[in-house]
Image (cartoon, helix red, strand yellow):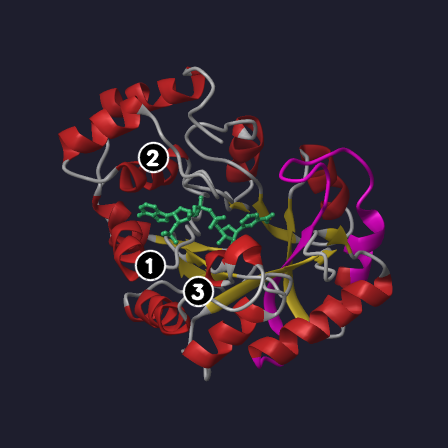
Amino acid sequence: MRKTKLGGRFTFTGTALTVHRIGYGAMQLAGPGVWGPPRDPDAALAVLREAVEAGANHIDTSDFYGPHVTNQVIRKALHPYPKGLVIVTKLGARRPPDRSWQPAISPKDLKAGVHDNLRHLGLDALDIVNYRAMGAGHGPEEGSIAEPVTVLADLQRQGLIRHIGLSNVTAAQVAEAQAITGIVCVQNHYNLAHRHDDALIDDLARRGIAYVPFFPLGGFTPLQSSTLSKVAGRLGATPMQVALAWLLHRSPNILLIPGTASVAHLRENLAAGQVALSPETLAELDGIAGEPAGVDH
Ligand SMILES: NC(=O)c1ccc[n+]([C@@H]2O[C@H](COP(=O)([O-])OP(=O)(O)OC[C@H]3O[C@@H](n4cnc5c(N)ncnc54)[C@H](OP(=O)(O)O)[C@@H]3O)[C@@H](O)[C@H]2O)c1
């Protein structure tokens, strides 16, 4: 794959929304445990502003990060939003005072969630809302998602949501949702070492639907692998840049939303499109998924 600025562009099928393939995930901007204010509020504003100034125009967020904190920080840093910025949020969970993650999928919860996102982001309509199935934590679990997706489709008809995506779902759940409304993206756990969704990614690619891996760098415990470090050293890149470049090479429908609270890490991540990987190096990196446990935490 040739070197590209921010990984090149992707248009969400059936929409007027075009983004660079390297975007930014805002979850790390909330405090420890995704709870409370940022550790460093000025750095949080700086990360968002630099991401957008560098051309990143896909920001992933949720009102349950903080809760409310990341949306409020995004608004403070970037409102009024530049033309072309696509903010993707998600519904389906709430954070009670004990800081746990609980499902919030009744029609009342989902409607309130849309209005909370609109208010905290300072928007009249949300570009893309992912229905985040709670499943089994960071992994999906079979079961109907028709009821909440139907509620989101109603909110879309009311003009409060422009497009609908899904998160933490199985292929069967994607098919079920598509029978109800258009689905523009799927956001599941996937990275160099965690490849349960290989078949789903290929299927979505054939249909032009975006696949947006969460935990692209391994999440709360970033990826560690001697193969990754060796390749990075050889290419003069960092391991995290190689992990992101591998995702860009993996499939043209993959969009990246790496999370960081650090401007230095943001710069590294945004430059991952400059890392070209040969077929031999891709094959070497593919081997990481088969390495002994401990690579992906
Ligand atoms: N749909 C879902 O259920 C779901 C679940 C989880 C996350 N998400 C979304 O996906 C986004 C990405 O996931 P994530 O932020 O949890 O995990 P991630 O992007 O895989 O990794 C973030 C971790 O990597 C570190 N990091 C980032 N860039 C780095 C670099 N260049 N070098 C070294 N370390 C680096 C960060 O620490 P520093 O802050 O120190 O850089 C942070 O600890 C989130 O921000 C969120 O928007 C969605």
In the rendered structure, find residue 246 and report the number of the disc placed on it: 2
The picture quadrant where one finds residue 287 is top left
Counting residues from the start of the chain, the first of labels 2 and 3 encountered is: 3
For image coordinates 68% across by 50% down, the residue present is 132
Q: Is residue 9 magenta?
A: no
Q: Position of residue 42 (x, y in %)?
A: 36, 74
Determine whether the residue tagged by mark 1 lies in a helix, strand or loop: loop
Neighbours of disc 1 within 10 Å: few (<14), some (14-19), many (20+): some
Which residue is identified by label 1? 262
For discs 3 and 1, the disc positioned in front in the rendered view: 3
For discs 2 and 3, the disc positioned in front in the rendered view: 3
Range shown magenta: 122-151
For image coordinates 14% across by 29% down, the residue present is 234
Instruction: Name the side, left or right, on which 32 lies relative to 137.
Output: left
Work out how far the residue at label 3 is from the one at label 1, CA to CA, in angstroms. 11 Å
Q: Position of residue 26 (x, y in %)?
A: 48, 60
Work out how far the residue at label 2 is from the one at label 3, CA to CA, in angstroms. 30 Å
Q: Position of residue 8 (x, y in %)?
A: 32, 52
In the rendered structure, find residue 39 and report the number of the disc placed on it: 3
